[in-house]
Amino acid sequence: MLVAAGRKPYFYSRSDDENAENRMEIDFLVPSRSPSRNRNVLAVEVKSGRRYATKYLVKFRRKFARRIDTPFVLHSGDVREKDGIVYLPLYMAPFL
């Protein structure tokens, strides 16, 4: 859906056997359509189950705070915002 909406998604993965804080994986990084200051990347996680964690998204956001615009989670639930993360239903992916 991101590609069909004209977005060019990237994937981020970092493995570190010595420091768990550096270990993370982000499903999609896409350029922001309206970058504010230096924050020109949207971090997007996709969750399929009802119960899930966003620890990698939180770590990624903390590490790259100067570059990350609004972080998103696409999930099967309703629209909401919690702790600076916007949760959207899966069908809203083209609107990122």
Image (spheres, rainbow, N blue to C red):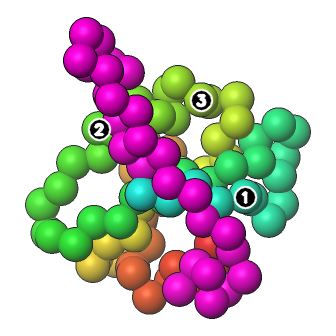
Left or right: residue 34 versus residue 68 is right
Q: Residues within 10 Å of mark 2 (few under 14, many from 20)?
A: few
Lower sequence index among marks 1 and 3:
1
Q: Is residue 53 above or below residue 23?
A: below
Q: Is residue 17 above or below residue 78?
A: above
Q: Is residue 29 above or below residue 17?
A: below
Q: Position of residue 51 (x, y in %)?
A: 12, 60
Q: Residue at x 59, y 29 (%)?
A: 64
The amino acid type, in three-letter code, at marker 3 is Phe
In whole angstroms, how far apart are the C-alphas of marks 2 and 1?
22 Å
Q: Residue at x 23, y 18 (%)?
A: 17
Q: Residues within 10 Å of mark 3 (few under 14, many from 20)?
A: few
- Looking at the rendered image, the disc whose residue lies closer to the viewer, 2 or 1, is 1
- Which residue is tagged 3? 64
- Which residue is tagged 1? 31
Magenta-drawn segment: 1-26
Q: Position of residue 69 (x, y in %)?
A: 67, 47
Nearest the eye: 32 or 78:
32
Asked whether the viewer can see residue 41, the reply is yes
Q: Is residue 8 above or below residue 25?
A: below
Which element type, helix, strand or loop, lies under badge 1? strand
The amino acid type, in three-letter code, at marker 1 is Pro
In whole angstroms, how far apart are the C-alphas of marks 1 and 3?
14 Å
Left or right: residue 71 versus residue 55 is right
Lower sequence index among marks 3 and 2:
2
Circle number at residue 59: none
Q: How many badges with numbers are in the image?
A: 3
- Which residue is tagged 2? 55
Lower sequence index among marks 2 and 1:
1
Q: Specify whether residue 8 is painted magenta.
A: yes
Which element type, helix, strand or loop, lies under badge 2? helix
